[in-house]
Image (spheres, helix red, strand yellow):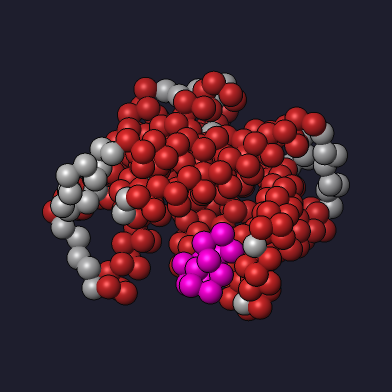
Amino acid sequence: TSRAKAAEAREAVASGAIRIAVFTIVAAGGQTMRNAMQRHLIGTLGTVGATHVRFLFGLPFAMVFLALLLAVTGESLPTLNAGAFAWTAAGAIGQMAATALMLASMRDRSFVVTIAYTKTEPIQVALFGVVMLSDRVTLPLAVAIIMATAGVLVVSWPKRLAEGEVWSWRPAIMGMGAGGLFAIAAVGFRGGIIAMEAPSFLIGASATLVLGLCIQTATMSAYLLACNRAALIAIFRAWRLSMFAGFMGAFASQLWFFAFAIESAARVRTLALVEIFFAQLVSRNLFGQRLSLREGGGIALLVVGVILLFAG
């Protein structure tokens, strides 16, 4: 009997790991497509307008996803409580603020250096998860987070360093601040899912996503209405491309939230670093760029980190 129970426990752990991996990897692919579309829209909508597309046009799709899940499962919509709203609002605001800081850092330094700063997020996710959600970070998990993050930093590091480029404090503080806010956003959304007290993790994740997008859409729409109505009008004029970006954003976010519902934010966001492989594919196919020895070493660190992540 004890052996049977142990076997069942191992099967449950394996099944959970597979689900997390599938949710995260597919979400990373969808996020890459969304980012590519948003980059294309920057030329016509501006940075703020292109950013808002993922919220404004993602919300209807997220609502459809939730409605379909409710219809298929026959479960009821969870009642919104103060805890779920507070956690989700913290995640939504943190995500918007993180994006603003990241873009501000890019004004002073190159894209790749800024991304390197923000990729400190997994370590910060683990720390915030421990403090705010009592997530348990084991030694293997800590080593995995450090190795995977180090791999991304090595891959992202500039080939040539101009004097003062990397260690100028202002962009460094903004970039790492963006990483910290992205970490807060991940923990906030996971906290919102837990506090939602939904009948299943699927409904809890979907309801939290809809709530978060409602907060973000209302906030950014009010800002653009007050400060940049031209950008808001341009978003609706480019509705075809915007709708595709919104769909991919909602689709990717739906899977991120599913993963957050069944695993700690630290583990999910560290596994999400596999997104760099998708970026490398796009870079190689579009620009004919090949991996250098340094970049190959960084990706090897990332792979080892991800393996250790699940071993821990």
Residue 300 appears at what percent x and percent y?
24, 47
Q: Which quarter shows the N terminus?
A: top right
Give me the residue at 78% from left, 40% from top.
Answer: 199
Residue 54 horizontal side relative to residue 41, left or right: right
What residue is drawn where x is 37% and y is 27%?
142
Q: For the magenta stretch, what is the residue range? A: 38-50
Residue 13, image x, y percentages:
52, 36
In which quarter of the view is residue 49 placed? bottom right
Residue 47 lies in the magenta-colored region: yes
Visible residue check, residue 300: no
Task: Single out the residue that lies furthest toward the front.
Answer: 227
Q: Is residue 173 left or right of residue 211?
A: left
Near-viewer residue (8 or 81): 81
Q: Residue at x 52, y 71 (%)?
A: 41
Above or below residue 64? Residue 186 is: above
User: In the rendered image, which quarter is residue 51 located in?
Assistant: bottom right
Q: Is residue 63 visible?
A: yes
Q: Residue 291, position in %: x, y? A: 20, 60
Residue placed most toward the observer, 14 or 62: 62
Horizontal side, residue 107 vs residue 296: left or right? right
* Residue 265, x across and y down, in percent: 53, 36
Indicate whether 173 appears above or below 271: above
* Residue positioned 50% across, 68% down in the render: 42
Q: Main secondary structure of the magenta part?
A: helix
- Judged left or right of residue 20, residue 239 is right
Q: Quadrant of residue 310?
A: top left
User: Within the magenta stretch, is there residue 157?
Assistant: no
Q: Nearer the viewer, residue 35 or 96?
A: 96
